[in-house]
Amino acid sequence: MKKVILAGGTGFIGEYFQKRFEDLGYEVHVISRRNGNIQWQDQKGIVEALEGADMLINLAGKSVNCRYNTKNKNEIMISRVVTTNILGEAVQKCSAPPEVWMNSSTATIYRHADDKPMTEEGGEIGTGFSVNVATNWEDNFFALHTPGTRKVALRTAIVLGKHGGVMTPYENLVKFGLGGPQGSGKQMFSWIHVEDLYRVCLFIEDNKQLEGVFNCAAPNPVSNEELMRLLRERSNRSFGLPAPKWVLEIGSALIRTESELVLKSRWVVPARLEESGFTFQYPTLESTLEEILEK
C-alpha cells in the first residue's frame, strides 16, 4: 500500500486530497493541530509517519484572507516557514525518507503582470509582503538538506472547487447583483481546479525526474472582467454592478481582508507542467465553472 502524508491537511484542499488518495487505496496520515491527527509538536510521531512514505505534501499555512496587520503578518510568515522546517528536520531523521516532498508555494510570488504571462523560467519575482512570504517559504524549503528526498515547490494559483475556496464569496457577489468587474477588470485571474492540483501531485510522483519549482495554474487565465461575466452567465444574471478600486478598499477593510487579493494581476501559466506532458482535465474557466456550479 502506498503512503502519503498531508501536512496541514484539514482545510478545503487537504480534505479533498485525503478523500481522493483514500479512493486510490493510499494510506493517508494527516499532520495538523486538529484532534485525531498527528500534532505538529509530536516530532516522533511525524518521523514515524514519514518513514517509507511515497509522498509528503505540505499544505500548511495561515490563510492570507485577513488584514495585513503586524500580528497577522507574523502568523502568516511563521505558519509557513516553521512548519516547513519542522518537516525538514523530521525528513532528515528518517532512515527511509519520503521519495518526494511537495511543498506549497504561491503564484503570488510573481509581480503584478498585465503585460505578459509569468513562467517558471522567465517570470519576474515581485515585491511587497505577499512576495516576501513566498520567497522566504521557498528559500527555507530548498535550503533544507534532504538528499534522499526529491523536492518540488508548487506555486499554486487560486484553487477552485465545490464547497470551498473562493467560490462562495464570488457566487454571493453575483447573487446580490454585485457581479460586475472589480477595479479596472483588466487584471488577470489565474486559477486551478482542485482536481487538477491533485492530479499534478500524482503526475510529479510518477515522473521521478521532476523537481524544483512548478506553476500550478490552468493554461488559460482570463481577465477579472471575463471571470465575472462567466459567473453571471452560469448564475443566469444579466447584470452586475462594478466595484471600483475605492469601493474595494473600503469593503476589504470592513470584512477584514486585503484588496490585493482581487486587484493584483496574476497572469501565471504552467510552462514546466505542459512541457513535461501534463494535461489538464479542466483547462478552461468554462469547464471549471461547469463542474463546480452544476445544479
Image: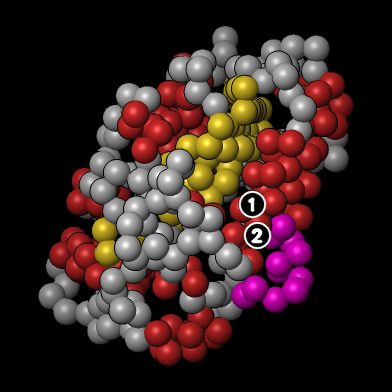
Q: Amino acid at mark 1?
A: Thr
How far across and down, in percent of the image, does residue 210 sit? 50, 23
Magenta region, main secondary structure: helix
Residue 76 part of the magenta-drawn span: yes
Q: Which residue matches tag 2?
A: 132
Residue 168 part of the magenta-drawn span: no
How far across and down, in percent of the image, does residue 5 sit? 64, 28
Lateral position of residue 235 relative to residue 32, left or right: left
Residue positioned 57% across, 9% down in the render: 1
**Over which residues does the magenta segment extend?**
67-77
Disc 1, SS: helix
How far across and down, in percent of the image, does residue 114 sit? 34, 65
Residue positioned 54% across, 18% down in the render: 26
Q: Which residue matches tag 1?
A: 135
* Number of other residues with Cα within 10 Å of mark 2, as a class: few under 14, some 14 to 19, many 20 or more: some
Residue positioned 48% across, 85% down in the render: 249
Lateral position of residue 144 relative to residue 269, left or right: right
Circles 2 and 1, Cβ within 8 Å, touching? The answer is yes
Question: How many angstroms separate mark 2 from mark 1 (CA)?
Answer: 5 Å
